[in-house]
Image: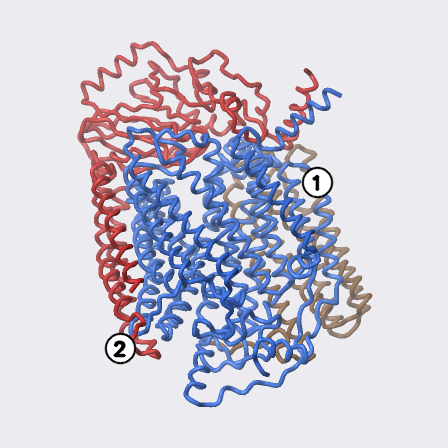
Chain colours: A brown, B red, C blue
Amino acid sequence: MAHAHNHAFAHEGGHDGHHDLEELRKFGFWIFLITDLILFSTLFATYLVIHENTAGGPDAKEIFELPGVIVETFILLTSSFTSGLAVLAMNAGSQKGLVGWLIVTILLGASFVGMEVTEFLKLIHEGHTIHSSAFLSGFFTLVGTHGLHVSLGICWITALIIQLSRYGITEVTQRKVHITSIYWHFLDAVWIFVFTVVYLMGVM
Amino acid sequence: MRISKMLRLLTTSVVMIGTIALVSGCKSMIVFDPKGPIGSQQRDLINITMLLCLIILVPVMLIFAWIVWRFRDRKGNDAPYQPVWSHSTKLEVIWWSIPIIVILILALVTAHYTYALDPAKPIASDKKAVTIQATSLDWKWLFQYPDQGIATVNYLVIPAKTPIKFELTSDGPMNSFWVPQLGGMIYTMSGMATTMFLQADELGNYMGTGANFTGRDFAKMGFTTKAIAQADFDKWVNDAKASGNALSEEGYQTLAMPGTSEQMTFASIPDGLFHRIVHEYSMSRGAPPGYTRKAQTLSGEKKAEHTEGGQLPPGNGAQKDSPDMSSTGPGHAIQMLDHHTHMNHGK
Amino acid sequence: MFYMMEDIGSFVSWFFVTGDPLIYGADVAITLTSVAIIFVLTFFGKWGWLYREWLTTVDHKRVGIMYIIAALLMLFRGGVDALMMRTQLAFPNMEFLAPEHYNEVFTTHGVIMILFMAMPLMFGLFNIAVPLQLGARDVAFPFLNSLSFWLFFMGAMLFNMSFVIGGSPNAGWLSYPPLSEMTGSPGVGEDFYIWGIQISGIGSLMTGINFIVTIVKMRAPGMTWSRVPIFTWSVLSSCIAIIVAFPVLTVTLALLFLDRYLGAHFFTMDGGGNSMMFVNLIWMWGHPEVYIVVLPAFGIFSEVVAAFSKKRLFGYGSMVFAMLSISIMAYFTWLHHFFTMGSGANVNLFFAISTMIIAIPTGVKIFNWLFTMFRGRISFTTPMLWTIAFIPCFIVGGMTGVMLSVAPADFQFHNSYFLIAHFHQVLIGGVAFGYFAGLYYWWPKMFGFKLNETIGKWAFWIWNIGFYVCFFPQYIVGLDGMTRRLSSYSWDTGWWAMNFTSTIGGFLMGIGFLFQVWQIAHSIKFMEKDTTGDPWGARTLEWSIPSPAPLYNFATTPLVTDRDDWWEEKERIAAGKMPKDKPRLEPIHMPKNSPIPFIQSVCWFIVGFGLVFHWLWIAIPGFIGIALTLLAHSFNYDTDYYIPVDEIRQTEANAGRSV
């Protein structure tokens, strides 16, 4: 088997312990992402099981409006791109560029969430609530969980921007930027599946 | 010294208790005393699997006892001691292959019986199967005989030596239909009907039971299955029809309310009731009346309050409690609390 | 005024569980115990000690001890539940417990034993042993570790609170809908169930992540994968199962809560819901869960059997392979919990065979344990006794498990007492015996003294005899048609003799537990201090340091050259060779204690409590508290410190070691 990774918690007892610690945290975050992936997979599976159980109510074709969703998708894809630009700026040592791109990312994220909330409110206003049918329960829960993740990401990056302005680009903030960026890309990838499975397959 | 004494004590007591248990238990273990073709095949299958298991179990137990005895740490033990010996490909191959072989045999046996004993597979017989539609309710069984046009509650009568086709559903929580001496169980689930064929080869009364927990009076869901001769069966059907006690649509709704029930016989059943149970009623049942978000209290008065829900005679407005939980919906629990408070104000 | 009083009165009788003398008695006992604890803490001025040393600690050893204490308390409660059930079933038509009460008791018994007893006891042993076996300073994320514990603790408290406030859940330990929906269980019990498990489940998930990172990244220099101690391997395989299974549980419980709270239709009878989806989902978690708790027990047996046979573990490679393959195969067997659903022959056959296949690696492990003892020198200490008792018990339990896996035969076993006897045999004989063995084995490393062996042996024999007397009759009564969860039965069933015997066995196990309590109390009073650090003459790194382990674990990071590194080192010294060189002492980098995990878990408790009663005015402040503590932690950059060399030298000298 592979060699031991001896990046132990300050194993050498010296002052380079921080670097190992940051590596450890990044690895831990990847494992966390696996669990989050399973969480979404379970929600997808649930949705697929019940998405035809409309209990006499409307089905996907009747309530989804694709143009809005396509705009949402583009906004989120763009935000994923800008979060990548933020990391590049950080690697180039530009704190200004980093913070700037992070702000663009959360603004895009916020407008994505805003559009989603508008869509939900419109549906609820028309009387299509989580209570209406199994299909809508699954829809609101799956899409809502993704939206909740994006919202959490926005809060997280906001907190990180404040920390960057306070501490600058250090090993710790660098790791945090990396992790939020991975998280953001992950949410983007999940959205692609939401878009395909829920909206595209629903309308087709 | 002490340990070996204790070991002996343990072994003796276990063996003694086991023997007593087996002697007293065997006679009455109804799974091993089947009265129909399905139950018999299941008993045979259980015996085969037990035998296959014992083939491994007995030698391993003996080896185990010998090793523990032989290699105990005491002065003067001349057994070999090889503290570094920790690998032997030959041995490993042997004990990987033993379970693999046994499991392979067992898998083949299982495959054969899984298809042979598929509950939905009709039993070969020159007689036409009798259909019985069983519905598990809170906390009673309704058995409809669609061809005969009659129904019973909490007891079954079947003609012996005739295949019985059970169609099973639930108008409430999931239950399981089990008559051990005729054969194994199948779940009853709301919104769908499952099928199971059983047959009694001998006359007699067989214990039947609900096997999946459904709430408060789950323990009261036992029922008797009477296997009688065809002529007696026909007579029983005619008597039932003559009894004049019809099951109406409303009667069914009352019956379906939570509560226990005595044995009952109905002379007629509404057309298509079973179909409606599967496709309409069980899909639309809100909370039963009398259920509140009030904390469970364990006193007698509370018990009395919601025991009678499902009692017949039908149509007498058996809803004792105000149907304050008849709607499920967002925040209904909070509405409930409000209701509770209002009632107090009204006094 | 009168109306207000009456309102308050009706609220109180709704809020508190009323009407049963048993519960009033418990109310009084709980109040008195709480008052006594507060009095003792205040009288001896121990509040500061409690806060500094325990509530805020991030030390894996202390977190482990807290897990174990909580688990033993829960074992007591789950055990009392069990004895209440056995009393109710001792005679036909008993009226000791009303049906509603009986339903609550078996539900809480199951939930507590699996989720609030087995899981924390397991995590306690993870925490005690894994970092020490790896030669590490702590787990990878000590802060997260403390948070995991407090989340578990608050979840457990929330669940247990339902006993006196609001009413206990009563729909079975897995709460199948539609029974657990608002239509079947309108009381708050199910919401206590959901939030108690949800909160502690988040903690379990984080522990899984934490230990995977610890094991993958924090092994001492030289500890290649083939030198990793077998218990640590078992923890790794268990944690892999945790991170894959627990998210499914989180989702399942969340969906059930949405059904109950917002009127969603995932598992309802109406609105297109599908209750069988819940059954599938919960067992996709539930079946791996069984292996999550049993794999570490396998690891403990492997450590113990090698240590007390004074011989290397036989077939290390195939043991590791077996455990990893079990942790992966555990995902492909879930449907065997409901063969009787009528899914058709093909589906049933697939899951029957996958279940049988998982028996192969499990069986192979038995042979490996046997041949570790073979040509060894077996000493019958308490950890070894539990291991020896485990083997035949688990063989029988495994065999009945194979019998249950034969789908068409399962139609006759399912939901009967045969099934009950089977899973108690593997869960008590496998999991509980394993954790007892681990507890006795690592006790000196935790506290610096051994537990009394004589009382321990008494406890062992009473437990074991009680076990067989309790569960063998249940196989028989199951084959006689008795189904689980029956609150009473009548004389004409013929089940009395078996049930009565079983009750006697249950109480014998209860007496065995009392002996264990006595054993602990007696050992604390007449403490036999372990000054060697290696009281058992064992094999792995945790025994190379003093007992109890110092705060920083290892004064210098060990360099690993062998699988049983400490044993080989002892052999070298015995053969007159030079021990391994130790590196020079250096300041040790340590994590700082933090009150945030405790505070955040209290906030989770508040959220859970608010959502149980659907009171947003309580839940929302709790959510705000969680958000604030998350931010506080994120903005805290002062998380670590160094222990100076002099202090290390002093600590080691106090433990009788020179460095």
In front of the other: C420 or C352: C420
Q: Look at the image and tell me whether residue A56 can be seen.
A: no
Residues behind callouts 1 and 2 on a single chain: no
- What whole-number distance in Å separates the C-alpha atoms at marks 1 and 2? 69 Å
Which chain contains the residue that carries disc 1? C
Task: Identify the image quadrant of the C terminus of chain C.
Answer: bottom right
Label 2 element class: loop
Q: Residue at x 53, y 65 (%)?
A: C446
Residue B322 lies left or right of residue A173; in this view the side is left
Which residue does the numbered mark 2 point to in the structure image? B80
Q: Position of residue B146 (x, y in %)?
A: 32, 22
Mark 1 and mark 2 in contact? Answer it, CB < 8 Å. no
Q: Quadrant of residue B173?
A: top left
Which chain contains the residue that carries disc 2? B
Tag on residue C618?
A: 1
Label 1 element class: helix
Residue B109 vs B305, above or below: the answer is below
Tag on residue B224?
A: none
Residue C557 lies left or right of residue C233; in this view the side is right
| Amino acid found under the numbered disc labelled 1 | Ile
Q: Position of residue C560 (x, y in %)?
A: 50, 80
Q: Position of residue A195 (x, y in %)?
A: 61, 50
In front of the other: C217 or A168: C217
Q: Position of residue C263 (x, y in %)?
A: 60, 34
The nearer-to-camera label among 1 and 2 is 2
Q: Quadrant of residue C208?
A: bottom right
| Amino acid found under the numbered disc labelled 2 | Pro
Residue C526 lies left or right of residue B327; in this view the side is left
Residue C155 vs C93, above or below: the answer is below
